[in-house]
Image (cartoon, rainbow, N blue to C red):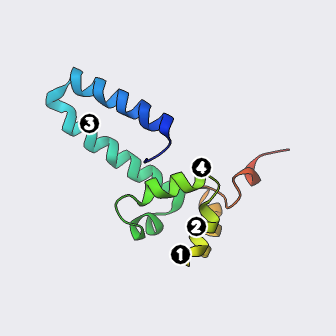
Amino acid sequence: MARSAEHQDYCGEYRGKVEAARPANFAYYQSRFEQYKGRLDAALFGEELVRALGKSGGDVLVRKALNNELADWLKLRGLEGEAGRMDERGGVPERPESHLLP
């Protein structure tokens, strides 16, 4: 599961519609989507961290953040400093609720 089950279902449905409507251009659209996703993951988590985790690094980080497991997961892997740096970049804070106003 890359993002969430609901997100994955939506992307799969959308991907199928695009492929059916423009089969000759589908590879181009897919490559642009992957580039966009990579830029978004780098903006949220930092390019170094995403790159260090490999090809599916952004998907893993998003899943952990959505499940409120990111800080603990990073600590287990010796990357605890990365969680604090995400706040500085304006990405996902260590405690997601910490950015909400009262």
> Callout 2, which amino acid?
Trp
Q: Nearest the camera: 71 or 32?
A: 71
> Callout 4, which amino acid?
Leu
Q: CA distance from mark 3 to mark 2?
A: 33 Å
Would you name the residue on which mark 4 appears?
A: 66
- Name which quarter of the figure residue 87 lies in: bottom right
Provide the secondary structure element on which disc 4 rests: helix
Q: Marks 1 and 3: in contact by CB < 8 Å?
A: no
Q: Position of residue 5 (x, y in %)?
A: 48, 38
Provide the secondary structure element on which disc 2 rests: helix
Would you name the residue on which mark 2 appears?
A: 73
Q: Is residue 78 above or below residue 29?
A: below
Q: Marks 4 and 1: in contact by CB < 8 Å?
A: no
Mark 3 and mark 2 lie on one chain; the one further toward the N terminus is 3
Mark 3 and mark 1 lie on one chain; the one further toward the N terminus is 3
Q: Is residue 29 above or below residue 51?
A: above
Would you name the residue on which mark 1 appears?
A: 77
Q: CA distance from mark 2 to mark 4?
A: 12 Å
- Residue at the extreme right: 102
Q: Position of residue 42 (x, y in %)?
A: 46, 58
Would you name the residue on which mark 3 appears?
A: 29
Mark 1 and mark 4 lie on one chain; the one further toward the N terminus is 4
User: Does residue 8 appear to the left or right of 82 in the view shown?
Assistant: left
Q: Residue at x 57, y 70 (%)?
A: 74
Q: Marks 2 and 3: in contact by CB < 8 Å?
A: no
> Callout 3, which amino acid?
Tyr
- Residue at the extreme top: 21
- Name which quarter of the figure residue 58 lies in: bottom left
User: Does residue 21 appear to the left or right of 5 in the view shown?
Assistant: left
Q: CA distance from mark 1 to mark 4?
A: 18 Å
User: Does residue 52 appear to the left or right of 74 in the view shown?
Assistant: left
